[in-house]
Amino acid sequence: MGVWQLIKSQFICLLLICYVFLVSGLIINLLQLCTLPLWPISKQLYRRINCRLGYSIASQMVALLEWWSGTECNLYSHPESYKYFGKESAIVVLNHNIEIDFLCGWTFCERFGVLGSSKVLAKKELAYVPLIGWMWYHLEIVFCKRKWEEDRRTVAQSLQNLRDYPENFWFLLHCEGTRFTEKKHQISMQVAESKGLPKLKHHLLPRTKGFNITVQNLRGPVTAVYDSTLNFRNNETPTLLGLLSGKKYHGDMYVRRIPMESIPEDEGECGAWLHKLYQEKDQFQEEYSQTGRFPGAVLTPARRPWTLLNWLFWASVLLYPLAGLLVRLVSSGSSATILTTAALCVAVSVGMRWMIGQTEIKKGSSYGNKDAPVNNN
Ligand SMILES: CC/C=C\C/C=C\C/C=C\C/C=C\C/C=C\C/C=C\CCC(=O)SCCNC(=O)CCNC(=O)[C@H](O)C(C)(C)COP(=O)(O)OP(=O)(O)OC[C@H]1O[C@@H](n2cnc3c(N)ncnc32)[C@H](O)[C@@H]1OP(=O)(O)O
Ligand SMILES: CCCCCCCC/C=C\CCCCCCCC(=O)OC[C@@H](O)COP(=O)(O)O
């Protein structure tokens, strides 16, 4: 292990990165709150400002991936698809197997200039995660309870609101609805069998209702679906904690552009189309596991300096007062003050650990662990 790698793996570095993220995030959340009165005056100005403020939070996590850990995310695609990236609004369908999949998505959003406006169909629980969830409120992220009776109305309404969004956006959909585990895979393949669908080896069975409602409500302003398939080389299993300790991973994402006109309008046909898409994605994953490559050419855009500059800005604003505070604390010699500060640090660390836990597969929900059809055979 080199010296730089050794420094990066020290707990103090992790604490400092989390401190900058936490305090800057709270400041940005507060600024976002202050923009609320703009909404009735100029909705589009409110949205544009919040895209920039949102960028300042999300790009810190991208900087962690691109600059701190040095993780490589290669883009496999086709020139006729590539020329549209960043120049139109799109629905992104991405497989959901990897803890940092959302971050690999964000890194491409950043490189194509749509990070601040990126959207997702997220489970409602994520709305309450401090910083990210609060930021998402101002970015009009679409939340679902994964209870269709409620979601069909609320999700459709939130999607309708995005129709006049003033910036190009990518709307991320993990149609599986939950991350891949062996147990969930087994159950979803029982569902596939009961529906007479072919089995998938690398994916859970996609849920069709969310995709269908998204296509229905965004058709027009959104001109394409980006079918995206992500995998990591050498069976790497990247984690957020790994990135924080400076570990480098090697990801590959295959993206092909599918024009919206080729997606059926009829609900049943649209569902069948999605199942076929996942069968194709499964083949791409199989090809990757055999050859270590996806179809298409490697067309990875270079990382940009903005995420690093944004992080350096916040670090320089926030680390200096922290150092001053620590010096004054130690020189005060008051054990009560020192103990209170230490307790506060522990509480914040536990809070951050809980937030990181939101991305961990082993702490995932039980969604998809139930609902197995009764086997009549
Ligand atoms: C150039 C580069 C290109 C791309 C870059 C890539 C990406 C960047 C883009 C944007 C980035 C933006 C943000 C990223 C940042 C962070 C976000 C991270 C993640 C958050 C993700 C989540 O929160 S995932 C969880 C929430 N999302 C979803 O659930 C979506 C999928 N779900 C649905 O669509 C559901 O249908 C629903 C939620 C709308 C409703 O759920 P509900 O459960 O109520 O209904 P269902 O229809 O699903 O259930 C009944 C039907 O399902 C069948 N069934 C039962 N059991 C199962 C099973 N185990 N598996 C599959 N199907 C099952 C059942 O038989 C019913 O079938 P019917 O035929 O009767 O419908
Ligand atoms: C500068 C770096 C700062 C590092 C500190 C990072 C702290 C982490 C902060 C926020 C974490 C929130 C990330 C939100 C995205 C999580 C996506 C996700 O993992 O959703 C799971 C969902 O799909 C399925 O859930 P289940 O499988 O049903 O359960």
Image (tube, grey):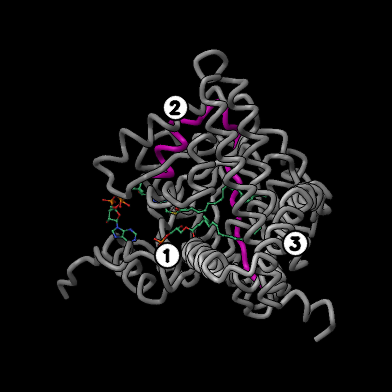
Q: Which residue range is magenta in the image?
A: 210-232
**Residue beneath disc 3:** 74
**Residue beneath disc 1:** 204
Q: Are marks 2 and 3 in contact (CB under 8 Å)?
A: no
State the image coordinates of residue 2 (x, y, percent, origin top left): 84, 83
Q: Which mark is residue 160?
A: 2
Label 1 element class: loop
Gap between marks 1 and 3 measured at Cα: 24 Å
Q: Inspect this view and state whether residue 343 appears.
A: yes
Gap between marks 2 and 1 measured at Cα: 28 Å
Residue 226, magenta (yes or no): yes
Answer yes or no: disc 1 within 8 Å of ligand 1.
yes
State the image coordinates of residue 76 (x, y, percent, origin top left): 73, 58
Mark 2 vs mark 1: which is more N-terminal?
A: 2
Residue 214, magenta (yes or no): yes
Give the residue type at disc 3.
Asn
Q: Residue at x 76, y 65 (%)?
A: 68
Name the mark nearer the viewer: 1 or 3: 3
Few, some or many residues within 10 Å of mark 3 (<14, 14–19, 20+): many
Q: Inspect this view and state whether residue 282 appears.
A: no
Looking at this view, is 368 or 313 the one in front?
313
Mark 2 vs mark 3: which is more N-terminal?
A: 3
